[in-house]
Amino acid sequence: MDPLLLGAIVAIATIIVLFSGVSVAIGLLIVSAGFLLIFDGARSLELIPEILFGKLDNFALLSIPMFIIMGASIASTRAGADLYEALERWLTRVPGGLVISNLGACALFAAMSGSSPATCAAIGKMGIPEMRKRGYPDGVAAGSIAAGGTLGILIPPSVTMIVYGIATETSIGRLFLAGVMPGLMLVGLFMAWSIYSTWRSGDTTVLSAGSYSWAQKFEILPRVLPFLLIILGVLYAMYGGIATPSETAAVGALLCMMIAMIIYKLWNPRDLWVVLRDSTRESVMILFIIAAAGVFSYMLSSLFITQAIAEWIGTLEVNRWVLMGAVNVFLLIAGFFLPPVAVILMTAPILLPIITTAGFDPIWFAVVLTINMEIGLISPPVGLNLYVINGIAPDISLKTILTGSLPYVACMVLGIILLCLFPGIATWLPDLVMGSSL
Amino acid sequence: HATELRLSHQWSNNDIRHKVAQIVADEVAAANVDLDIKIFGSQSLFKAREQYKPLSRGQLDMTVLPLSYAGGQQPAYNLTLMPGLVKNHDHAARLSASPFMAALEEKMAQDDVMVLVHGYLAGGFAGKDKCITKPEDVRGLQTRAAGKAFEQMLAGAGASIASMASSEIYNAMQTGVLQAVNTSSSSFVSYRIYEQVKCYTPAGDVALWFMYQPLLMNKSTFDGLTEAQQQALRDGAAKAQAYYLDEAKKEDAASVKAFADAGVEIAQMTPEDFAAWRELAKETSYKAFIADVADGQALLDMALAVD
Amino acid sequence: MSGHSSAAAARTGSNPVLRAVAAISTLAGWVSATMIVAAVLITCQMIVIRYVLNGSTVWQTEAVIYLMIAATLLGLSYVQRLRGHVNVDLIPLSLPPRIRFVLALTTSALTIAIVAVILWYGYEYWHFAWERGWRSDTVWGVKLWIPYLAIPVGFGLLLLQLVADFIALLLGIDKPFGLE
Ligand code: NA
Ligand code: NA
């Protein structure tokens, strides 16, 4: 059979199986096993355990649970609230100050957590009830946190960047740096929109929290110190010659656990277990998808589908920006239905040759891809951040969250357009720190 | 309907080892014997170190790989990446045709594996702050070595061994996590190590680091082919092997040029340096090998006997 | 952090068998979490040995990798019990109860089938490595049957939890896809 036709059949089968409600990792395994059985024979099934094990046999994957633990241990303390309160005391005069504080807290927290759901949970637990109490509409409260939380995978450290780095053999240190400026840009866009929309609603006085004295403003600053120490410590370990990025993750995890235990008195074994349980759950879920996606990509490659698609795209004579537009639409659609890690692993082997052949920088593309994945995190039916918001505020309807996050999705799309116009936003910092790109 | 063979390897399309596989595939196709070799490069089918197991179980037909990757399954293979055992490329070619290699091929046959194309590639050392030519040079340096036997020898010289994936070497050299690295000429170039080091010691008239990287085939699969198909494979393999030897020599020169162009100092290992390393290796990696492998001493003697 | 899906953790009711399986999965979850913590500590130890003491770090990378793999595979059943394996529940949500029930039975049966296949070949692979005395190709030279053991054990525990979930579904103790 023509590999391209076969590829289309595989795509349809995958969609049907994943929509049946089976878990994503198992679904990938079912589809892979089915096609291998038909086209490669029963003996090819022998290879599945070997491939699963082989995909996990990679030191860099260690950093996934580590960066998740960093976020989860801090999220279980008052630290998120402190951070958020400090920002709020300093930002009360700005229209929509509370939203701005939440977005800023999300961005800072993202610099400590590799995972978006963890970022969303850490800030949202405090931020959403507070915003609602002060009279912000439910949509604004939930939408801004849902969107702000997605920064977790753009601002380093980032689980998706690690997975992309492994899948495409690009430097993880460089990828992390590439996310910094675009992350700041998105925070800026999010904040600008919040200020504008609050100002336009004309409700600024109602929404303002009143004023804080300078004493109150300075008094809270020391409580933000642990955050800064962790962020600086991790950055120093990573770029100062102490450890490789994957190793640094373990340092960060240990630091965060220690700070949570010593400064925030997280002694109770029950509370500690909650941190470990949540981290284990998210890590195992992601790592199982990584392993299963490995079997899926083995199947695609074994049936020559990956190679045929790459060849076919190579023969298409389209403008490179049309191509990039098509890739973005494809990623957006994939992101609606699948968690980021699954999208990256299933598409990177096919997309990367296409991207590099068309003359795009793989580091820059990682950022574009990540922003697409951020949109996916807050879009149904599979949006990890939506589940988190639903857990914090079960009474806010999905429709309200979605309407509230829509303007932020628009900001992200604008961000992608800006990145296409000015690729330097992503590539400038890594080039500055690590020399011109590989 | 033509018989299809699947060949897996870990390298990119412009790597010498891909070209070796491509020559065999092209020759077999040109022979018109109803045989088609499909190449899966860049680890698109199996990861680099996960190829030998499916090959030996007949789930994969052919592969090009460093045989020492399978040293955990056949400890004798560790002799194919042993310091000081091979002096230069011509010596490597003589080793490939020696009773030593025949003994190794017997081991492979136990795993239902056979060699189609023999070939060795060379490598050298690079230092972040200084040149590495003799054992004293690596004392106290954080070093990443390619291969178990080299780690044992370097540890014996007082180096600290850091293990990490080859894709991490560049960053680790840049930030100073690593101060010395030992790998193949082609890896030095493809990972652009020349941007991060002060001095490079390439494979020259004498070189320490040689790695056996043959094109292997599952034996039962080969035996199941027709006489004409087997002959076509053998003919293609002969042509590829000649090409492999030629290009392997050029590879070292190309790496020297890349480093020199980047302004990196080029150092040479003298015959005395080589002898010092080999003495050290005898006390460390050779010793460990003999202790580990039942017929290790006999195999080592066979290899050392090749002039 | 809150749940990862609109579905609630698997229910056992008062059925002793289901509760026993749940307890086994929870125990596996503890082991998995402990392994992750061990990996954190070993990695930090490695950095200290290398950066502070300038010593050799021969076994740490490998140990950490095997711990992570084991943590993942042993954690599968626990995460299944918590319904932490993310899925697309758009279609199940929109179906009438009877059809949703049939769909849940079908996907559960398929899941059990694929996990059983992996368990079978995983056991074979483990046995092969054990019989042949395979080791890793490093100075440390770990006997590979030890890390490979995580494949049959992990998928065996997952199979157990899946069968328990299937029974809970049949007995009406748990709702299809955990949806209310
Ligand atoms: Na982050
Ligand atoms: Na989504």
Image (cartoon, rainbow, N blue to C red):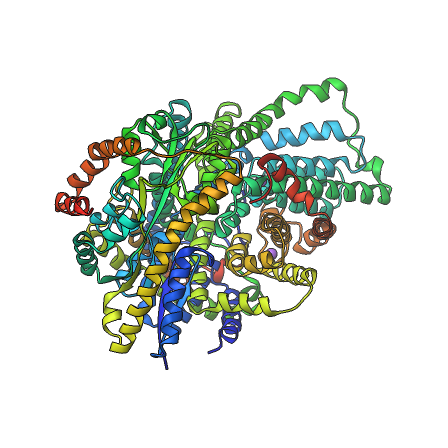
Looking at the image, which residue is at 57% across and 45% down? A117
Pick whichever, A94 or A357, lies toward us.
A357
Which image quadrant shows ligand 1?
top right
**Quadrant in the picture for the C terminus of chain A:** top right
Q: Locate residue A227, reporting x and y percent.
A: 59, 28
Q: Position of residue C139 (x, y in %)?
A: 27, 39
Residue under the point 75% across and 45% down = A137
Q: Which residue is drawn at 27% across and 35% down?
A: B152
Measured as percent of width and height from the top left, residue A360 is found at 63, 54
Can you say whether B222 is above or below B126 in the image? below
Depth check, front residue: B153 or B54: B153
- Please identify the quarter of the rendering in which residue C131 is found: bottom left
Count of picture labels: 0
The image shows residue A300, relative to residue A2, as above or below, that is above
Is residue A65 visible in the rendered image? The answer is no
Q: Where is residue C167 in the image (x, y as percent from the top left)?
A: 37, 62
Q: Is residue A435 in view?
A: yes
Instruction: Locate residue A400 relative to residue A262 in the image: left or right.
Output: right
Q: Is residue B41 left or right of residue A97?
A: left
